[in-house]
Amino acid sequence: MPVLEERYAVRGEEVAAKVFDDEVVVVHLGTCTYYSASGSGADAWSWIATGRPLADVAAGLAERYRIDPGRAREDVDRFVARLLDEGLIAPANGAGAVLEALSVPADGKEYAPPELHAYRDMADLLALDPPLPELDRPAWRAAGDDGRP
Amino acid sequence: MRILFVSDLFWPHIGGIEVWGARLATGMAARGHEVRVISSHSDPGLPDRDVLEGVAIERLEFRAAVEERRLDRFGDALAGIKRIKREFEPDVIHLGTVGWSTVFHLLTLDAWPAPWLLTLTQQRLASQTSSSDTVLGRALKSADWVSSVSGAVLDEAIDFSPGVAGRSSVDYWGMPAPLEMPPPTFDPPRLLCVGRLVPAKGFDLAVEALSVVARRHPGISLAIAGDGPERARLALLAKEVGVDERVTLEGWISPERVCARMGEASVVVLPSHQEGLPVVAVEAAWSGRPVIAADVSGMAEVVAHGRTGLLVPPDDRDALATAIDEIVSDRERARSMGLEARRLASERFSLKSMMDAYESIYERLARRRIDARA
């Protein structure tokens, strides 16, 4: 399990990520596996990716979702362990930049522990159905039965 | 009822799933429902917005976002599907297949709380090994209803995700009845394969089987209608096994031509390694042609062995050759198989029964939402 004071960084040479509203989408370019996380997971990802120590990340979740700080630390630990397992982040070298303390007022959102969803079959789904040629007009009608009741 | 249909590809792309989706969407619009389609903008030449017989189509960058791993496009597609869901406020959402568009739907489930239906059109992929971290696994878990194009595909889905059992149905693909064809002729015997030229279709087996039966039936020929990456390899194989003068690679034919083309054939051959419910087998049945097919997945639900055609073990060239020989040698039996196939098609694969089945599912799902709000 990671130590809370540690910082982590996104493995930029193999991993691309983007946060959209309340959702983060992460792609491991090596395996073509897609990941997503929403809510607290998107928050945690964003803070981890900017080099914040895990203690800050846990404090941020506790503040935003008004949950017990101990619970937040456990959830962040689990989330980070999963990100490490998937090869999406790695321990950051050095002390890291000095960042301002997180200020994340509670916004009334219901808390669910950060969870990473993986989609491991995307490459196969693409290969399964390559683009096909096109028709220049609808052409599947036949005389008689048009399916109407 | 407002129906949002989501599909990786849609008209004007052709292929079994695309033609089925277009029939379903335009058919529902013809029944008075408001139908909108979200599809992929995989071809840059296609407009972002289109209309097909009263059905509004919007094309988003699903495929490019995933294939090119372009996260900016991913964001645009996510925003697009959210916007459409919120603007259209569908009573029901129907995913026409499991594909890359499914991910975008799953990521935007909260955008509009409509019940949703997933149609399974093919077998599970070998890579889909866990119910929690694949697109299929997550889709099966969260869909309100799962419709399968064949009993075999549904059984596999239930094995994979047992919770599907209580919220699923088999709804066969239907198509408009083509005009009745004259019975097949065999002077000379003409075999026909139809489909994408990809390894999964097993057309190489048909070429090899032809080389075996050509010794007993000198005039026999094989036409392959379709195109794809296997074309050059099939041409080379035909030459290698000495049947290049008997094999014609015809290229694509449009869906409305398929049944007429089948009417010119004696027998339709489907040596596929993998199929959900082969549309070609349904078209062959409607065309009154006996079918010789590999016994994979849902094939036995379209081809009644010994009654409408013959099923052979998959990947078995010699069994395929023996079956071709059997049909071509007993023409009266082949003709009666064709008649029986057409009867089976009208019973099981009519467009009206397919439309009725889906309309009933939509209504049931939409009702749930109304009840939940009440």
Image (tube, rainbow, N blue to C red):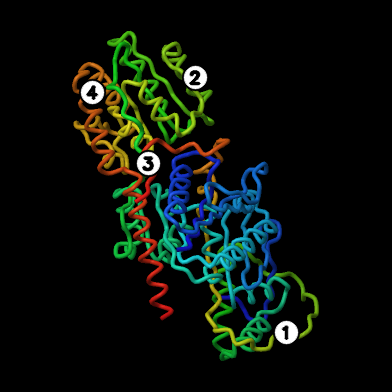
Residue with the mark numbered 1: A102
Q: Residues within 10 Å of mark 1 (few under 14, many from 20)?
A: some
Q: Residue at x 44, y 24 (%)?
A: B224
**Could you tell whether B112 is left or right of B283 in the image?**
right
Front in this rendered view, residue B328 or B230: B328
Q: Which mark is residue B169?
A: none
> Residue B20 at x, y = what percent?
43, 45
- Label 3 vs 2, first from the N-terminus: 3
Residue with the mark numbered 4: B334
On screen, residue A77 above or below B263: below
Helix or strand or loop: what does disc 3 sit on? Answer: loop
> Residue A26 at x, y = what percent?
62, 62
Q: What amino acid is at disc 4? A: Ala
Q: Residues within 10 Å of mark 4 (few under 14, many from 20)?
A: many
Q: Residue at x 41, y 27 (%)?
A: B203
| Total labels drawn | 4
On screen, residue B86 above or below A68: above
On screen, residue A19 above or below B211: below
Figure quadrant of the C terminus of chain B:
bottom left
Q: Residue at x 68, y 73 (%)?
A: A46
Residue with the mark numbered 2: B235
Front in this rendered view, residue A132 or B342: B342
> Residue B212 at x, y = what percent?
32, 16
Residue with the mark numbered 3: B175
Looking at the rendered image, the disc whose residue lies closer to the viewer, 2 or 1, is 2
Q: What amino acid is at disc 3? A: Met
Separation (CA) of disc 3 from disc 1: 60 Å
- Label 3 vs 4, first from the N-terminus: 3
